[in-house]
């Protein structure tokens, strides 16, 4: 068996290990180590790589941004920012048909701007918004579908942990990726609100309304949202303007949300320890997946899989748009069985060399950023795609009276909205790039 055949056969083996419920980081690590052993023909270089790769991965400065953004999300939750955002959005929009659900989407977008994690956004906003949605007569399907979809805004609206990982893998500028993600993130929130509007017109019994709030109350609740605005402008604005690096921005954000949580009384000795432990646990999981992906992708490089696939696509003269469409469809399929981080780490080292040899009429940097945004959006769809959409299970665990089948049904309009948005951003790259071109 040639090295290339060995690399290709590793894919079904990896999927088999994942289906057998082996942690995906461990599955990739085992495939990478075993494959490298077979390529080298000796265990000695594999053991040497195990030592060196582990140290270089865990000591990489670029990865320090991940635990800082995760800690910022923990402190933001303790600071009551999620509740303030939802209260403000509900006061302004709740009197409309489907308005409380739209308010939940808007609050998810605001919280995603200071969190960076989809699961954290979904879980946090569900604690705040789910009781209110049920109180005003929203069906379990619409309530859980809305919050599951709204949670995906946590990785789309900057800052985003997934974008950071993509930037590291493709050696792109994190700040420029954050800039390019902003407009698609706003479009996602608007698309979700339109999906809710269509849903409640087709099924009016699925949503109730709340009394219209007077303007005095509407403006009063806006005062409580100022900490979110300050943190967002300090972190993302500082990164956009080049005042500090993304890692420094994450540190500023973590410190700022920590101070706000302390002032609001949410940060105590006990909750501080819990936040640190939760951040450490999530960071360890992410880092181990990064390590496993590093070994597996190193084995694929040894087996010449990315290089041979890129050369094959280039020699065949395939239409670039057809190749891109096929890749995006594969991401949708992978999203049904894998989590977003694993998809990025597993596929980008393979797909990115393939698409970079194709001509899309963009410069190398612009194409890498545009492709990253498309991948991020499709990965986001995977978080709410049955049967293994992670956000769906988070919501189903919190809304125990709603069957998972109802959640699947409720999230369908949002998946349709996502697919239409992917098509729009694919056909018109300028939507993602015009702010980037204006600033840089």
Image (cartoon, rainbow, N blue to C red):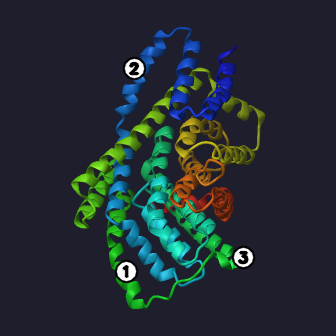
| Label 2: few (<14), some (14–19) or many (≥20) C-alpha neighbours in 10 Å | few
The residue beneath circle 2 is 51
Q: Residue at x 45, y 53 (%)?
A: 117
Task: Looking at this view, name the residue that lies furthest to the front.
Answer: 401
- Cβ–Cβ under 8 Å for marks 3 and 2: no
Say whether residue 19 is left or right of residue 57. right
Residue 132 picture location, percent across and down: 49, 73
Is residue 52 something one can see in this rendering? yes
Disc 1 element: helix
Q: Nearer the viewer, mark 1 or mark 3?
A: 3
Quadrant location, the N terminus: top right
Is residue 440 something one can see in this rendering? no
Disc 3 element: helix
- Cβ–Cβ under 8 Å for marks 1 and 2: no
- Kindly indicate the quadrant of the structure image that contains residue 304: top right
Mark identifier at residue 221: 1
Q: Residue at x 35, y 55 (%)?
A: 74
Distance from the alpha carbon under mark 1 to that under mark 3:
32 Å
Q: Nearer the viewer, mark 1 or mark 2?
A: 1
Say whether residue 283 is left or right of residue 255. right
In the foreground, 130 or 262: 130
Mark identifier at residue 378: none
Q: Residue at x 55, y 67 (%)?
A: 189
The residue beneath circle 3 is 202
Q: Earlier in the sequence, mark 1 or mark 3?
A: 3
Say whether residue 66 is left or right of residue 257. right
Residue 114 picture location, percent across and down: 39, 60
In the foreground, 152 or 247: 152
């Amino acid at each position: 068996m040639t090295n290339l055949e060995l690399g290709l056969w590793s894919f079904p083996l990896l999927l088999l290990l994942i289906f057998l419920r082996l942690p995906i980081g461990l599955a990739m690590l085992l495939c990478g180590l075993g494959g490298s052993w077979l390529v080298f023909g000796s265990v000695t270089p594999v053991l040497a790589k195990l030592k060196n790769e582990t140290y270089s991965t865990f000591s990489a400065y670029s990865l320090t941004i991940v635990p800082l953004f995760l800690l910022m999300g923990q402190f933001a939750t303790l600071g009551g920012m999620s509740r303030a955002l939802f209260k403000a959005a509900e006061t302004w929009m709740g009197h409309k048909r489907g308005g409380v659900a739209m308010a939940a989407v808007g609050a998810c977008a605001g919280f995603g701007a200071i969190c960076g994690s989809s699961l954290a956004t979904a879980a946090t906003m569900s604690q705040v918004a789910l009781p209110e949605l049920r109180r005003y007569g929203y069906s379990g399907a619409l309530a859980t579908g809305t919050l599951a979809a709204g949670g995906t805004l946590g990785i789309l609206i900057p800052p985003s942990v997934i974008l950071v990982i993509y930037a590291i893998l493709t050696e792109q500028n994190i700040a420029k990726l954050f800039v390019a993600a902003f407009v698609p993130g706003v479009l996602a929130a608007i698309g979700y609100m339109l999906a809710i509007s269509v849903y409640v017109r087709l099924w009016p019994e699925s949503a109730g309304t709340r009394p219209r709030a007077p303007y005095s109350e509407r403006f009063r609740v806006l005062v409580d949202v100022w900490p979110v605005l300050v943190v967002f402008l300090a972190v993302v604005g500082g990164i956009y303007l080049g005042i500090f690096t993304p890692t420094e921005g994450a540190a500023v954000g973590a410190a700022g949300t920590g101070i706000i949580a302390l002032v609001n009384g949410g940060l105590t000795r006990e909750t501080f320890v819990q936040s640190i432990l939760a951040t450490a646990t999530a960071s360890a999981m992410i880092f181990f997946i990064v390590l496993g992906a590093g070994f597996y992708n190193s084995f694929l490089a040894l087996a010449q899989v990315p290089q041979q696939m890129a050369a094959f696509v280039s020699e065949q003269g395939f239409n670039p748009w057809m190749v891109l469409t096929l890749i995006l469809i594969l991401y949708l399929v992978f999203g049904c069985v894998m989590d977003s981080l694993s998809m990025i780490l597993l596929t980008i080292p393979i797909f990115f060399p393939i698409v970079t040899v194709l001509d899309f009429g963009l410069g190398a940097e612009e194409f890498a950023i545009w492709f990253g945004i498309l991948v991020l959006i499709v990965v986001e769809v995977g978080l709410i795609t049955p049967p293994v959409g992670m956000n769906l299970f988070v919501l189903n665990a919190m809304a125990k009276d709603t069957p998972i089948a109802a959640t699947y049904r409720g999230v369908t309009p949002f998946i349709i909205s996502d697919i239409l948005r992917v098509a729009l951003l694919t056909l018109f790259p300028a939507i993602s790039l015009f702010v980037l071109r204006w600033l840089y």
